Amino acid sequence: MRAIAALAAVMVLSPTLGLAHEPEGESLPLGDGHVTDHPARGNVFACALIDGRGFRGGGARHQGDWFHGDTWNPLEKPHVGGRVMWPRARLSLKASGDTVAVSGNGLPVNEPTGKFPISPDEEAWRYDTNPNPIQETALDFEIPAAPLAAAAPGCLPMGMIGFSLTGVAFYNALDDAGRDAAAHEVQDLCDGHPQGRGQYHYHSASACLPGVDSNAVVGWALDGYPILGMRDGGGKRLTNADLDDCHGRAERVTVDGRAYDYAYRLTREYPYVMGCFTGQVRAETRQAIRRSMGPPPRPR
């Protein structure tokens, strides 16, 4: 698929060997409690609240001093140490007919991770004892080449809701307890970490994503719509007020000659990536992802 090459001209350069941008200093609104059983701007429409499963609990064990009432400050939050590169990382996208075939191993292409499991010697371990190593996780599914808007927005599952152009899964903004994962869980220098079966993922707008602070495509949702960076074509930093209930908006985006009439947008504020699915997710896609992940892990 030529999309990745075509985007290179409009993407900002990624940090050299994964040197992430410093997080911006101002405090962010805490997303705790902003999870609903229906679409609502600034919230996550969570399948866990409508399928009877609820939230299992888990995630970080202590709340750190980077919380200040209903805000949190990324600069005050510790990160998991280490800078591990993954030379075996791969991602390919191939358009054929009405679908795009996605193939990868879930590792970040040309970007680093921290060192997991978290060592007890690290400050981060005081708050989050994530015991999971990063493992290859097969990305082997198809998304629509021409997405179709659903009759009504769809809820977001716990687990993959999309993926970045570097091959890393996007998850929704919630941890296993239904809280703001970006605020509570301790991530690495690229704001990522592995879950129980080792899948490395982002809950928010990773500073290591090429194009994160621009108007470029940074990834794709499972319904086939593109995910774009935090600024519009005029350079304005977008906020929830600019977006709809699903954390996107109607706009024209052209990728590899294909025109899209809608895109999700990264933001610094919760829910960061997506609030719900605007488009239809293929049943075959959901099944392929479930097969690749196996049974759900136990909460940590």
Image (tube, grey):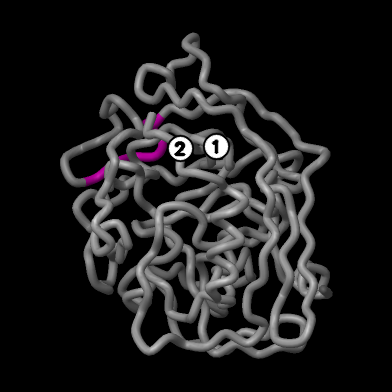
- In this picture, residue 231 sits left or right of residue 138: left
Q: Specify the amino acid type for callout 2.
A: Pro
Residue displayed at 16% across by 40% down: 69
* Residue hosting label 2: 297
x, y percentage for residue 126? 37, 17
Q: Which percent across, then down, holds residue 281?
A: 51, 75
Tag shown at residue 230: none
| Residue that numbered label 1 is attached to | 197
One can see residue 201 in this view = yes
* 28, 253: nearer the viewer: 253
SS under mark 1: loop
Horizontal relation, residue 74 to residue 115: left or right: left
Considering every residue shown, the one lying at the far top of the view is 121
Q: Residue 150 appears in which quarter of the rendering?
A: bottom left
**Amino acid type for the residue under numbered disc 1:** Arg
Q: Does dot 2 land on a helix, a strand or a loop?
A: loop
Point out the image quarter for the C terminus: top left
Q: Residues within 10 Å of mark 2 (few under 14, many from 20)?
A: few
Is 78 a magenta residue?
no
What span is in magenta? 71-77
Query: Is residue 204 at least partly visible in the picture?
Result: no
